[in-house]
Image (cartoon, grey):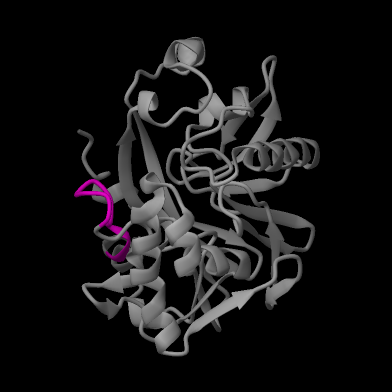
Amino acid sequence: MPTFPPAASVWQHFTLNDWQIIALADGTTTVDLTQVLLDREVQAVMPLLDAAGLTNPVTISINAYLLDNGRQRFLLDTGAGGLMGGTAGHLIASLAQAGYQPDQIDAVLLTHIHGDHSGGLLSGESLAFPNAVVYVNELDTAYWLSETQMRQAPAARQRSFENARRKLLPYQAAGKLRPFTAGSALLPGIATLGRPGHTPGHTYYILEELGTRLVFCADLAHFVPLQLADPTIALVYDVDPAQAIHSRQLALAEASAAGYWLAAAHAPFPGIGRIEVAKTGYRWQPIDAATSTL
């Protein structure tokens, strides 16, 4: 079982004009591909694993991001909290090492309501970010907070519904939950783009300053070497697998053509890089370790 990254790698600082962007490591999780692949056996993806120097089970990062413009501080996702064992759930510690406290966060921007993105909303049963409002695509709240949808969902998804309600409803009760419609500017300097399929309201956040674009692309891919080389690989996590594949194909084609920066929740920490066309599909080109200005 992997251990949490050493202190030197739990946060990393970048600058995009007037914005300070802090990549925050929540930790890692290890996944057995035999349990999560849809419509194909592990043997079918072994050549891709081998080419990436990986073996099954696969360990992936869980990344979150803090955006600070000197006036407000926005947190992109909250990590897993206590939902995924001791190798994850370290966002608050990473935040502290970067010099921030939870009560300094003005808004939490959720890319979607899955446990490894919303699990850190609570500290015990209290609001982990007491001064923050929580923004999330209204299609996700309509799905994950619906008792009707929960009753109709397959048994394997029941825990996700329970976790969603446990983590989001306290913010709703406190008047701090802000569902939004994707496709427009959410906050000054931050636009939203719906990329549904993985969840109904799976959302990218876009920060663009003076011609430089950084797209927080959430779960574009869980297993980056596999799902970029073959974007048709779907997972049991996908609420609508066909739509998730379509959204990924659109995102990869656009990002590779435009060449902008991406911040990916499950790419190796710090999760910032670009998409390049490869002989087979696409490949992830991580940001150079010495780069701090985007």
- Does 103 sit above or below residue 6? below
Q: Nearer the viewer, residue 117 or 161?
A: 161
Does the stretch in magenta take in 103? no
- Range covered by the magenta-colored residues: 83-92
Residue in the picture at 41% in, 63% down: 118
Whole-percent x, y for residue 182 in the image: 70, 66
Identity of the residue drawn at 48% across and 39% down: 267
Against 250, residue 216 (above or below) is below
Please indicate whether residue 138 sits to the left or right of residue 23 in the image.
right
In the picture shown, does residue 222 fall above or below 65? above
Please identify the quarter of the rendering in which residue 129 is found. bottom left
* Residue appearing at x 79%, y 58% in the figure: 211
Q: Assess whether residue 87 is covered by the magenta stretch.
A: yes
Residue 11 seen by the camera:
no
Q: Residue 96 at x, y = what percent?
A: 29, 68
Q: Is residue 200 visible?
A: yes
Q: Is residue 11 above or below residue 224?
A: below
Location of residue 34 in the rendering, given as x and y in whole percent from the top left corner:
37, 23
Using residue 183 as the reference point, say whether residue 157 is left or right of it. left
Residue at 40% in and 49% down: 157
